[in-house]
Amino acid sequence: MKFDHLSPVPELDGIDCVILEELQKNARTSFKQLSALTGVAPSTCLERVRNLRRSGVVSAFRADLDLARLGRPVEALIAIRFHTHSRDQLDPFVEYVFALPETIGLFNLAGDDDFIVHVAVADVDHLRMFVLDRLGSRPEIDHLRTALVYERFRKHVIKLR
């Protein structure tokens, strides 16, 4: 995975912070609603959101899914340690893990573990199969450690002011 050069982050003022906090709560908030919250015209809100998107501060608008209702109620975090560290191993591994439908997220770490893979599966048998067959068969992996997630808490709004 190659990293693109990031554009400088624009200086955020109070209006931008209100817009960003509201869009985190509900990405479908209308420009009219943003206007009422910020005290500026809807066209100004539209232009500010466009600038925030252009600069990369807002990277995407997403739907938050209930994985249990989609038949994947079991979540786990799988810690992975590689035998050796090289770009030749890292990039194909990241691509492989992201192609797996069970994968929710992947974190590259400093420390004892090289990666944490966040997965959601139908049941514990599926999790066992995933760990043994999908990850355990990878030649670059030296060690795997699985932690079952009892409950996930997520901060949906990052405060900016």
Image (tube, rainbow, N blue to C red):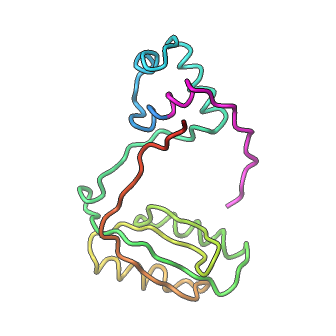
Give residue 125's quadrant in the image. bottom left
* Residue at the image point whose x is 36% and y is 58% from the top: 153
Dividing the picture into quadrants, the one containing residue 143 is: bottom right
Q: Residue at x 39, y 54 (%)?
A: 154
Up/down of 88 relative to 72, above or below: below
Total labels drawn: 0
The question of residue 16 being in magenta is answered with: yes
Q: Quadrant of residue 86?
A: bottom right
Q: Is residue 88 magenta?
A: no
Nearest the eye: 89 or 52: 52
State the image coordinates of residue 19 (x, y, percent, origin top left).
Answer: 50, 28
What x and y, as percent, mark residue 27? Answer: 42, 34
Task: Give the magenta part as a residue range.
Answer: 1-20
User: Image height check: is 58 above or below 136?
Assistant: above
27 left or right of 97 in image: left
User: Where does residue 160 sit, x and y in percent of width and height?
Assistant: 54, 38
Question: What predominant SS class does the magenta segment belong to?
Answer: loop
The relative height of residue 50 versus residue 115 in the rendered view (above or below) is above
Of all residues, the one furthest to the front in this rendering is 161
Quarter occupied by the C terminus:
top right
Give 11 or 33, whichever is nearer the viewer: 11
Does 152 sit left or right of 1 as displayed?
Answer: left
Residue 106: image x %, image y %?
A: 53, 65
Q: Is residue 116 above or below residue 69?
A: below
Give the quadrant of the N terminus.
Answer: bottom right
